């Protein structure tokens, strides 16, 4: 019993773990809320593109000894806005445009990195996260940015829903679809860059997509999906850190593995659309086909 | 028909799409109480003309004048039916613009949405997730969403495509009631039978307006052949048959 208690309390004795828990919990929560729109808009690919396109900005900031997060944010935001503008051309599908800019930005980053050979540690921490090395100003910054991002998404919820349901009708009704798209892209970019410290460039997509996808399996209501996604993101990040601490494993990777375990559980056990429920309803339908005819439910 | 009841006036409108004139010099009007069918073959520019009226496609010539709020009912495949929202939520989303930025729906918004649900016969399905609806129910949800904004003019793109007969009857009845209420309706369709049954007036489009009149027009073979660009084809077939004989 005391061992179990120690498992939960031990990490909290260490200041660096306290800060890591705080950052991971906030990042998980914010990614959950923003990720709902990434999943519902089918923006997983653009999220990945933005995460990778922050890379040249980070490299440039490093070269000129600027703020790595600001550099990443500027590069990610530039790419996101370019994608939003170029994909207004109806002849090109959005994913095509994303493919062009995503590969370009990452390629540019690699070119920049290849000009120096001494910087490997910091760049690898950007690619894979450094949540155990955050200081208290990082905690406050993440909390502040996160609050702004969540507030923005909640304030624009009604308009984002209308545009996601049906862009053309939203446009015909006079909603500024392009500006809403750009706002969403910028929010997604800011969320990704803010999360880089916790899980890094490569794994941040899991924090954005997996909790929201898990929540989508469990509900048909947007508010419930938003609450569940933020709860999964938050709980998964904390649990991942515990696992990482207890077994001395990489923090970012552990968080992603825990989040994916949540997703797998939901995929199997979800009440209506999970694997078990689907198998059961198929079996029921089979039994009904043999038994007496059921009464018709619902109307056309 | 007095001018005060005129809800839509399209005058000599041309729309270029990808270097080709999709619509050329098309004119039509819709007045309150009318259900106008916009008919024509595939590629005749029906949807493009609707998009021009809505301001979604740029006109290269001519003018569009619409009175009051314009409601739009797009084709069903243009809508994200996998979104986690119920029927009432979609219908209320039709008032997004009327509610305004950073505001929550007020009593009047809820009443308008309730009334739209009632008109479309969806009151019993209001809490149903949209992913669980049939094709006909989905079509009615799109109509109700447009009605929630309280439009005087309603533009419908192929509302009868892919819906079963009971739904067609229900939509026919609904459109008739909306027109009787003084609203104007303009719908594209390639279903001639449905148009003949429902519409008070039909406009035959083949890039430009080739004929216009009451639904009895649809029973006139010469006009129909011309509208569908078949008159010359049939003429040359007849000429060849004559030469062979």
Image: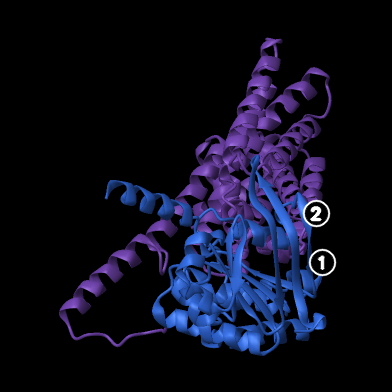
Chain colours: A purple, B blue
What residue is pinned by disc 1? B101
Vertical side of A180 occupied by B172: above or below: below
Looking at the image, the residue that sits furthest to the left is A290
Residue A4 pos. (x, y %) = 50, 54
Q: How crowded is mark 2: few (under 14 residues within 10 Å), some or many (20 or more)?
A: few
Please name the residue shown 61% across and 54% down the image: B207
Residue B181 pos. (x, y %) = 68, 89
Chain holding disc 1: B
Q: Which of B209 and A139 is in front in this view?
A: B209
Q: Is residue A291 left or right of residue B56?
A: left
Chain holding disc 2: A
Vertical side of A262 occupied by A277: above or below: below
The answer to which image quadrant residue A64 occupies is top right
Please name the residue shown 61% across and 42% down the image: A94
Label 1 element class: loop
In the rendered structure, find residue A146 and report the number of the disc placed on it.
none
**Is residue A230 in view?**
no
Q: Are the residues flagged by discs 2 and 1 from a single subunit?
A: no
The answer to which image quadrant residue B165 occupies is bottom left
Please name the residue shown 58% across and 86% down the image: B176
What residue is pinned by disc 2? A148
Q: In this view, does A68 lie to the left or right of A104?
A: right
Residue A247 pos. (x, y %) = 50, 39
**Which circle, 2 or 1, is nearer the viewer?**
1
- How far separated are the C-alphas under marks 2 and 1? 17 Å
Q: Nearer the viewer, residue A93 or A207?
A: A93
Q: Assess whether mark 1 and mark 2 are in contact (beta carbons under 8 angstroms).
A: no
Can you say which quadrant of the picture contains the C terminus of chain A?
Answer: bottom left
Q: Residues within 10 Å of mark 1 (few under 14, many from 20)?
A: few
Q: Which of A36 and A138 is in front in this view?
A: A36
Label 2 element class: helix
């Amino acid at each position: 019993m005391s061992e179990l208690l120690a498992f939960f309390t031990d990490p909290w004795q260490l200041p660096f773990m306290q800060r890591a828990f705080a950052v991971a919990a906030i990042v998980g929560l914010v990614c959950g809320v923003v990720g709902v729109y990434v999943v519902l808009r089918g923006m997983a690919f653009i999220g990945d593109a933005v995460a990778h396109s922050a890379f040249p900005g980070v490299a440039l900031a490093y070269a000129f000894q600027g703020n790595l997060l600001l550099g990443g944010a500027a590069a990610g935001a530039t790419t996101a806005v370019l994608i939003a503008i170029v994909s207004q051309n109806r002849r090109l599908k959005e994913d095509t445009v994303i493919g062009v800019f995503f590969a370009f930005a990452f390629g540019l980053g690699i070119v920049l990195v290849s000009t120096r050979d001494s910087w490997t540690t910091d760049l690898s921490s950007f690619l894979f996260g450094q949540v155990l090395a955050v200081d208290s100003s990082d905690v406050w910054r993440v909390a502040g940015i996160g609050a702004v991002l969540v507030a923005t998404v909640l304030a624009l919820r009604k308009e984002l829903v209308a545009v996601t349901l049906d862009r053309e009708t939203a446009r015909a009704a006079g909603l500024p679809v392009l500006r809403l798209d750009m706002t969403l892209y910028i929010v997604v970019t800011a969320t990704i860059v803010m999360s880089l410290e916790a899980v890094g460039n490569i794994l941040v997509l899991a924090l954005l997509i997996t909790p929201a996808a898990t929540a989508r399996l469990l509900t048909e209501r947007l508010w419930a999906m938003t609450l569940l996604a933020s709860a999964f993101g938050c709980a998964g990040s904390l649990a991942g850190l515990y696992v990482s601490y207890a077994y001395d494993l990489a923090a970012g990777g552990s968080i992603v593995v825990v989040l994916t375990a949540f997703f797998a559980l939901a995929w199997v056990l979800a009440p209506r659309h999970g694997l078990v429920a689907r198998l059961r309803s198929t079996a029921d339908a089979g039994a009904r086909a043999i038994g007496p005819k059921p009464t018709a439910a619902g109307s056309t | 028909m007095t001018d005060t009841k005129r809800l839509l006036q399209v005058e000599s409108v041309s729309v270029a799409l990808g270097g080709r004139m999709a619509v050329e010099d098309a004119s039509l009007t819709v007045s309150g109480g009318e259900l106008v069918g916009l008919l024509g073959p595939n590629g005749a520019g029906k949807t493009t003309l609707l998009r021009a009226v809505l301001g979604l496609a740029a006109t290269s010539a001519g003018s569009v004048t619409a009175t009051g709020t314009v409601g739009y009912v797009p084709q069903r495949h243009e809508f994200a039916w996998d979104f986690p929202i119920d029927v009432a939520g979609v219908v209320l989303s039709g008032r997004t613009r009327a509610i305004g930025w950073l505001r929550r729906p007020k009593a009047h918004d809820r009443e308008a949405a309730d009334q739209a649900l009632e008109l479309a016969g969806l009151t019993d399905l209001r809490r149903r997730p949209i992913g669980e609806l049939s094709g006909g129910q989905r079509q009615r949800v799109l109509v109700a969403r447009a009605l929630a904004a309280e439009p005087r003019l309603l533009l419908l793109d192929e509302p009868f495509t892919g819906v079963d007969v009971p739904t067609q009857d229900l939509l026919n009845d609904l459109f008739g009631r909306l027109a009787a209420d003084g609203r104007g309706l303009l719908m594209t369709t390639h279903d001639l039978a449905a148009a003949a049954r429902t519409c008070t007036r039909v406009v035959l489009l083949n890039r430009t307006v080739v004929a216009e009149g009451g639904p009895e027009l649809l029973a006139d073979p010469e006009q129909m052949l011309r509208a569908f660009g078949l008159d010359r084809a049939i003429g040359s077939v007849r000429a060849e048959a004559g030469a062979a004989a």
